[in-house]
Amino acid sequence: MGKLVDKIAVVTGAAQGIGEKIAERVLQDGASVIMLDVNFDKLQQTASALDSSGEKVFAMKCNVADPDEVTKTFSTIYEKFGKIDILINNAGITRDSFFHKMTPEQWHSVLDVNLNSMFYTCQAVIPHMRAQQYGKIVNVSSSSSWGNLGQGNYSASKAGVLGLTRTLAKENGGKQITVNAVAPGQINTDMTKDLPEDVKKIATMLTPSGRMGDPAEVASVVAFLASDDSSFVNGECISVSGGFLMV
């Protein structure tokens, strides 16, 4: 606790689930948190629950799949706060379908939110981080990056996140910017709650820990990567999956 005092953190997809818990954890660790999400009503509720005073948590509506919105939103953040120390790219969606049935809309919508958004947000912060000679970027990938039935779009996007993460780490490490990723496995969130029970049972069987994970368990690893405790960790992906075995 207290390891992120005086830091400004931006968390995308922060209205609920893993994003909400990430925002909560970095707030507990001392950071001021700007929470971004396209669902502004839910985002405001979440932000208010985390900080009713409005002094440390700030909700901003932003569709991170829209480059113009990202440019405007991050410009506003820099004008108001003067810096961004930590960027946590968590926004993500699923549009599952077997590949031979997948529509172009299902493909592009997932790539736009899960991968293209990181291009926009990272480009918005990296020049500033390079100038200040400091920055922490944490990207949320997935155990599905290895490939998963019915998730050709999602798996491709999350694999792309890993390639982007490692490239940015190599390009910016000399400027004291670390870029890492986490790969959650089967986590209890709104995204997974509607999965058929037999699918959940199989996922649990494939997880040596014998259960699904909690969003807070992902948030704790993200908080480590966002802190200076991870100062010599760069270009890595930490699996937060209970040892989930992809088949």
Image (cartoon, rainbow, N blue to C red):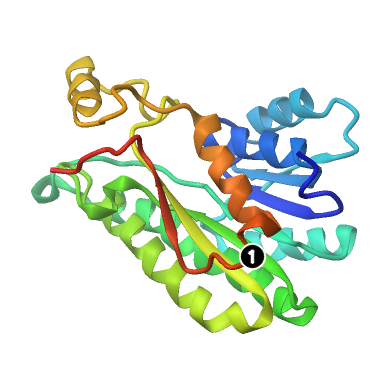
Query: Residue 64 falls in which quadrant of the image?
Result: bottom right
Who's the residue at 69% across and 34% down the image?
A: 24
The outermost residue toward the top is 197
- What residue do we see at 66% from left, 70% from top? 124
Residue type at tag 1 = Ser
Task: In the rendered view, tell whether residue 136 sits above or below residue 38.
Answer: below
83 displayed left or right of 185: right
Q: How many marks?
A: 1
> x%, y% of residue 50?
76, 28
Q: Give the quarter of the figure containing the N terminus.
A: top right
The reply to whether residue 112 is in sight is: yes
The reply to whether residue 17 is visible in this rendering is no
Left or right: where does residue 127 sit relative to residue 209? right
Task: Pinpoint residue 86: horizontal percent, then vertical percent.
Answer: 69, 58
Q: In the rendered image, which residue does mark 1 sit on? A: 231
* Above or below, 151 relative to 78: above
Residue 59 lies, with reference to residue 233, above or below; the image says above
**Residue closer to the observer: 43 or 183:** 183
